[in-house]
Image (tube, rainbow, N blue to C red):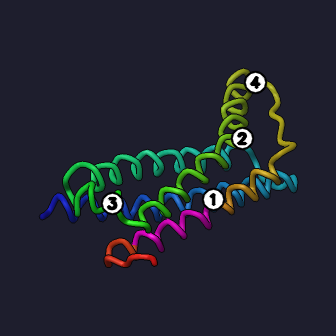
Amino acid sequence: MLVHWSLAAIHLLAFAMGFWAVLTRGTAFRRLAAGAGEARSVLVADNLWGISAVVLLISGGMRAFGGYEKGTDYYLHQPLFHLKMTFFVVILLLEIAPMIALIKWRIALSRGTTIDTGRAKLFARVSHVEALLVLLMVVAATGMARGVTLG
């Protein structure tokens, strides 16, 4: 019972941290685009966003497929689980461009060269859309936890 509770708490806390981190990253991108921010703020928030994503994947995978919750069959036949995973896939797809750009930034900064901040405003918007999708994932998860079915 304690393991179930711990996994659920860790999963929910990772959602909170992920929401905060991607929202903060978006704000840092926006400040950078306006000439009032610095790349370090973006990179720190991005690191936390990445850590929360890993924790979400591990804790969510354990809960859904590791025998700690309602069981794999429940999740695979739960429409809200599919909706939640759709939001997750959309986040992953949206994350490709910022991730590649930020990897290039890290490489450039480690070499002491300048970074290309030309798409910072776009990445701010992408980050804020991802934050909304994280919230929608939580809404879907609360419906799943209560056995809500669609249709």
Mark nearer the viewer, 4 or 1: 1
Q: Nearer the viewer, residue 117 or 83?
A: 83
Q: Residues within 10 Å of mark 4 (few under 14, many from 20)?
A: few
- Viewer-nearest residue: 53 or 60: 60
CA separation in Å, label 4 and label 1: 30 Å
| Crowd band around label 3 with a 10 angstrom C-alpha radius: few (<14), some (14–19), many (20+) | some
Of tags 1 and 3, which is closer to the observer? 3
Q: Which residues are magenta?
A: 130-141
Q: Which secondary structure class fits the magenta region best?
A: helix
CA gap, disc 1 and disc 2: 13 Å
Q: Secondary structure at mark 1?
A: helix
Disc nearest the viewer among 2 and 3? 3
Secondary structure at numbered mark 2: helix
Disc 1 marks which amino acid?
Glu
Q: Residue 130, which numbered label?
A: 1
Q: Percent from the top left, x then y, of residue 126?
A: 72, 55
CA distance separating discs 4 and 2: 22 Å
Q: Is residue 93 above or below residue 17?
A: above
User: What residue did someone put label 4 on?
Assistant: 112
| Residue type at the position of mark 4 | Gly
The amino acid sitting under disc 3 is Tyr
Q: Residues within 10 Å of mark 1 (few under 14, many from 20)?
A: many
What residue sits right under mark 2 in the picture?
A: 97
Residue 142 placed where, x, y %?
A: 39, 75
- Contact between marks 4 and 1 (CB within 8 A): the answer is no
First reached walking from the N terminus: tag 1 or tag 2:
2
